[in-house]
Amino acid sequence: MNPAEWLARSAARDPARPALLAGREVVADYGAFAARAAAVAGGLAARGIGPGDRVAVFAKNSPEYLIALYGIWWRGAVAVPVNAKLHPREAAFIVEDAGAALLLCDEGYAAALEALCPGCAVVPLGGASWQALEAAPPQVLPHATAAEELIWLFYTSGTTGKPKGVMLEARHLEAMTLGYFADVDAVTAQDAALYAAPMSHGAGLYNFMHVIMGARHVIPLSGGFDAGEVLELAADLGNVSMFAAPTMVRRLVDVARARGSRGEGLKTIVYGGGPMYVADITEAVELMGPRFVQIYGQGECPMAITVLGREEVANRSRPDWRARLGSVGRAQSTVRVRVADAEGRDLPPGEVGEILVQGAPVMRGYWRRAEASAETLKGGWLWTGDMGALDDAGYLTLHDRSKDVIISGGTNIYPREIEEALLEHSAVTEVSVIGRPDPEWGEVVVAYVVGAAEPGALDALCLERIARFKRPKAYVFLPALPKNNYGKVLKTELRAMDAESV
């Protein structure tokens, strides 16, 4: 199914319903949203863009971003979203690798990208050439997209090398969308999707559910995440749902507490994209109530591997609630999940191995990377590179990426377990644990900490909660942890820093 057909149907059903909001202001109803997308499709056709051609979008969140995406799909082309926080040179690599015929970007990037991407036409959003696109005779009907047609080419964040393009077909995003309704949350026409995280990533993928139901799409005037702005918009607009990385949830809770807010107007916060520590989500629920749903996914299986529903996130009546809350939930309806050893053999409950996924949302493969595709898609399963363990009830607990596991004295040590313990200290705001090469043990545990805690107090905390051999041998205090443009901690950078310090 072409997502543009979902938009066309919502526009036909109720064209006057509010669709796109800049802050509190409605800038387009569904009739105008669909008409502008159809016009963009016509403008793309006039520029020679046809079905299957790649069109990149390198821009901050805005109403035009959604119009651009739906114009691309209305034409039958492939959207290539590029995180607006990247450097223009990094964006240019993606544009070139994707073979994009056209780049839609913020006006401030246009000059640099025209120089960096000589083989690609550059159209600044909101500029004269964009206005010309929107003024073109519209393409009357959306392209009749087949299930196996590529529509979304998403580039991985590239923390360990050059990013790779994840090929997602119409059927993959359709499965993800329908799985949201089945497993994550219900959506009504009275709801509003708030885009505070980059629309090039998970937040943007959650537009589909709200387009289908004719709900509102709200872009904060800041263009990104400002916790105070989110709380104010939610209180004014009501029924607001949003995707947030764990660091965003932490900031939202801190600001809400300082303001005396309990998250009024927020319906659902779907969190994922990194580890959410039990202490943080426990505090979030205590303050704001049962508004939180956890998902686990990857670009290769977008937002669609496991889910921990709002009732389970908020439930404190079970004796094992902490273990459940420390998990990422159970397999979503459209996938199977296994934990396996290096040979692909199933591991028993409780034993840590690599997480494997199979199902309708799993990518076709990597764009022009046959070898990488073969390494990741083996035996009909997606090998995620994440380590985890399943319990008897099918709840999956993440441990770490396989490359992040510390092997000390021949024993595997999983950094997240130590990080969870250290975050119980009230003076610790962030922590990341790595392995330091050691001639006797192979590796020893080192904790990089943001906060004012004393090492002795952290040692005592670890000894209360985890085995002695897992306790960090050193604590390094930093004002902030290094992160990539998606907010994920860069352990590769921490390892490099650590190597220089010893």
Image (spheres, helix red, strand yellow):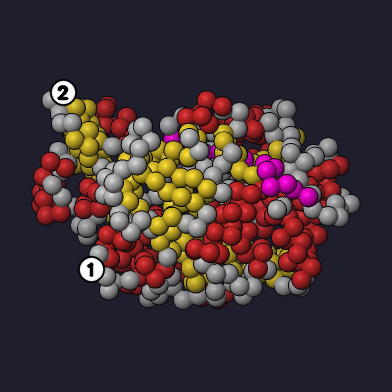
State the residue position of label 1: 319
* Main secondary structure along the magenta-highlighted residues: loop
What is the crowding at mark 1: few (fewer than 14 residues within 10 Å), some, or many (at least 20)?
few
Q: Amino acid at mark 1?
A: Pro
Which of the image's four quarters has the C terminus?
top left
Q: Which of pointers 1 and 2 indicates the residue nearer the eye?
A: 1
Q: Secondary structure at mark 1?
A: loop
* Residue 342 location, quadrant: top left
Picture residue at 13% right of the left edge, 47% below the top: 467
- x and y percentages locating residue 256 in the rendered image: 39, 70
Along the line of sight, which residue is nearer the eye, 325 or 80?
325
Along the line of sight, which residue is nearer the eye, 92 or 324?
324
Q: Is residue 214 above or below residue 67?
A: below
- Asked whether 145 falls inside the magenta stretch, the response is yes
Looking at the rendering, the stretch of residues picked out in magenta corresponds to 144-159
**Is residue 270 something one can see in this rendering?**
yes
Q: Is residue 186 above or below residue 476?
A: below
Picture residue at 29% right of the left edge, 46% below the top: 348
Q: Residue furthest top?
A: 439
Q: Are marks 1 and 2 in contact (CB under 8 Å)?
A: no
